[in-house]
Image (cartoon, grey):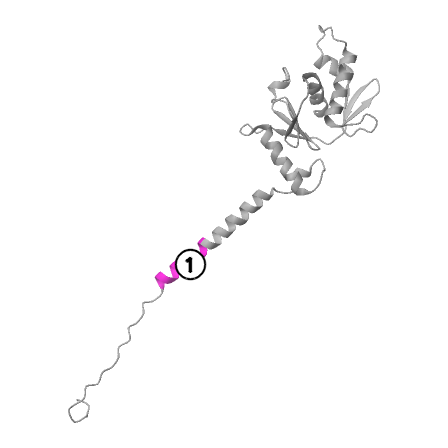
Amino acid sequence: MPTEPSISRDRVFRFGPFELSEREGELRKGGVRIKLQEQPFRVLVELVANPGNLVSREDLHKKLWPADTFVDFDVGLNSAIRKLRQALNDDAENPRYIETLAKRGYRFMAPVDKAAMDPLQGPRAVAERASSVDSSAGTNGPHAGLINATPIASKRRVWIAAAVVVVAMAAGLLIFWRTRPPAVPIVEAVTELTDDGEPKP
């Protein structure tokens, strides 16, 4: 889990099939957690928080490697970037996510969608919703999950509409039967005859 100040934030970053949650300290791909050590995770947070911009080695040193540590910074940072590329299945020669700017720093290349974490459901549910939408959209683009509504929501709307129609029809029939005029009884005329076959006056 990342240490302060990252853990105090609730930011969630989405890029491609990945989702990065600061509070949970997790990187997920299609809802599946990818194991990532603390230092590579913190480097990734700094990169995705500044997409398209140069994040210098000096900035990473100041923010993520305290001055009183005895760790070799260059070795530690290079190792963190290597582990990030493995986790993201990225290639240093043809990067899709992390571009190296020699002796200067790194740039995160993919579009990033920032969102606040859902406090009730957490990042896992958000990732599963995004994954289901991506598959229904039939595309692997970075914003594929934002294009169409989920199939479950569409089916639910159809069922609700059908139920409303049925209830309306039943109410209409009930009103019709209650308000129609009562049937008038048919009275048959009976003619009484006299003994000689003539009708009685």
The image quarter containing residue 109 is top right
**Residue drawn where x is 74% and y is 8% of the image:** 71
User: Looking at the image, which is closer to me, 50 or 37?
Assistant: 37
Q: Is residue 21 left or right of residue 183?
A: right
x, y (%) of residue 53?
Answer: 76, 25
Tell me if residue 175 is in the magenta stretch.
yes
- Which class describes the residues within 10 Å of circle 1: few (<14), some (14-19), or many (20+)? few
The residue identified by callout 1 is 172
Q: Is residue 197 left or right of residue 41?
A: left
Reply above or below: 63 against 10.
Answer: above
x, y (%) of residue 48?
Answer: 71, 25
* The C terminus sits in image quarter: bottom left
Query: Extreme left residue here?
Result: 195
Count of all numbered marks drawn on residues in the image:
1
Q: Is residue 169 visible in the rendered structure shown here?
A: yes
SS label for mark 1: helix
User: Looking at the image, which is closer to me, 178 or 34?
Assistant: 34
Reply above or below: 170 against 23.
Answer: below
The stretch in magenta equals 167-179
Q: Is residue 58 left or right of residue 151?
A: right
Tell me if residue 157 is in the magenta stretch.
no
* The N terminus sits in image quarter: top right
The image quarter containing residue 45 is top right
**Residue drawn where x is 64% and y is 39% of the image:** 133
The image quarter containing residue 5 is top right
User: Looking at the image, which is closer to me, 194 or 47?
Assistant: 194
Q: Amino acid at mark 1?
A: Gly
